[in-house]
Amino acid sequence: MDKLLKAREIISETDKEIAALFEKRMEAVRLVAEYKKERGLPIFDSSRENEVIKNSLENIDNEEIKEFYVPFIKGTMEISKRFQHRILEGANIAYSGVEGAFAYIAAGRIFPDGNRISYPDFKAAYEAVEKGECDAAVIPIENSRAGEVGQVIDLLFSGSLYVNGVYSLDVRHNLIGLNGVTEKDITKVISHQQALDQCANYIRNQGYKSESFENTAMAAKHVAQAGDPTLAAIASRETAELYGLKVIRENINEASNNTTRFVVLSRTLCKEKRDHSIIVFTVPDKAGALAHAINVIGHHGYSMRSIKSRAMKDLIWTYYFYVEITGDLQSKRGKYMLDELSECCDRLKMIGTFKDNCKI
């Protein structure tokens, strides 16, 4: 047998082995997709992909062909993502508000293949996941200017869902109106009160009247339906496109660092190692109880990224604490800390883990 025939035979045998391994790999990918669906996790994870490439290169001893293995493994991962997309196309994602609201935009960026389902308020979106109507919920928890969303934090304390992701969305307010309309044509703007407040200087300088609406998307929808060239809304570019409106002036909010953090909620806690953890707890009504709890956290080498106190609705003058901790509490060290913390807390609950600086 000459060299060419021998080489082709080796390639055929190898391709057969690769095909069998490909099937095995894709079955594992299916399990990954099912895991992500249960926990409300997005398909794309850049840090994990970089780790896979690095580890895979260590399996190649021949330096001459090493560089050619990178596109091979990247192509394999791209196919894996497409397979996961197909599996997850039926995932239902709950959000609060109407089409075009910032939660709608956030849900679409985190789950591009998910079916976004609107609910009238945070509680309804949360309960949709608890009841099994939806696989995950995307709900705002904090704005860099307006502060925490207390109702959502209360749901985290009292409900059964887990936080498996925290994502930051830059909020950019735009003046939007009918096609052909200019700033000079506008006499009145409508939007959510927070958006109006954040754009107060622009509104005042333009001499516009303003009116508060339930949210930015509903204001845009009203402008589109009213057909009044003197009326404009303040909303996002995506909202303008959704309702067939024109962006008349971009970025009219006073502060450029306006960011909203959204939590992704699901019925199962993610077990992967993460940068940050979230707990809620109550302490006995006695001197030094809170200080003792905080000292336990610090004693085990963890730092608190934030701590918030919230009044308990069913017990007057009684509070619980929401804490974001830097570090993984699902490690052995974290479990030791939680065990010790439980001894000085009346109630302690681990409600989530998340990676830092996830922008959408």
Image (cartoon, helix red, strand yellow):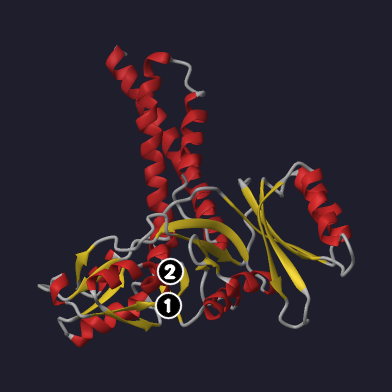
For residue 328, above or below residue 160: above
Give how far apart the Cα atoms at labels 2 and 1 are: 7 Å
The one nearer the camera, 215 or 162, is: 215
Q: Is residue 245 left or right of residue 342?
A: left
Tell me what residue is drawn at x 48 percent, y 17 percent.
Answer: 61
As shown in the figure, which amino acid type bears the numbered disc 2?
Ala
Give the image quarter of residue 15. Answer: top left
Q: How many numbered marks are there?
A: 2
Q: Position of residue 27 (x, y in %)?
A: 50, 49
Image coordinates of residue 170 in percent, x first then y, are 40, 57
Please tell me whether mark 2 sits on a helix, a strand or a loop: helix
Place residue 38 in its image quadrant: bottom right
Name the residue that disc number 2 marks. 103
Residue 243, picture quadrant: bottom left
User: Could one spot residue 115 in this view of the protein?
Assistant: no
Q: Is residue 136 left or right of residue 322?
A: left
Do callouts 2 and 1 mark residues in contact (Cβ within 8 Å)? yes
View extreme (left): residue: 180
Disc 2: CA contacts within 10 A as few (<14), some (14-19) or many (>=20): many
Which circle marks residue 97 in the picture?
A: 1
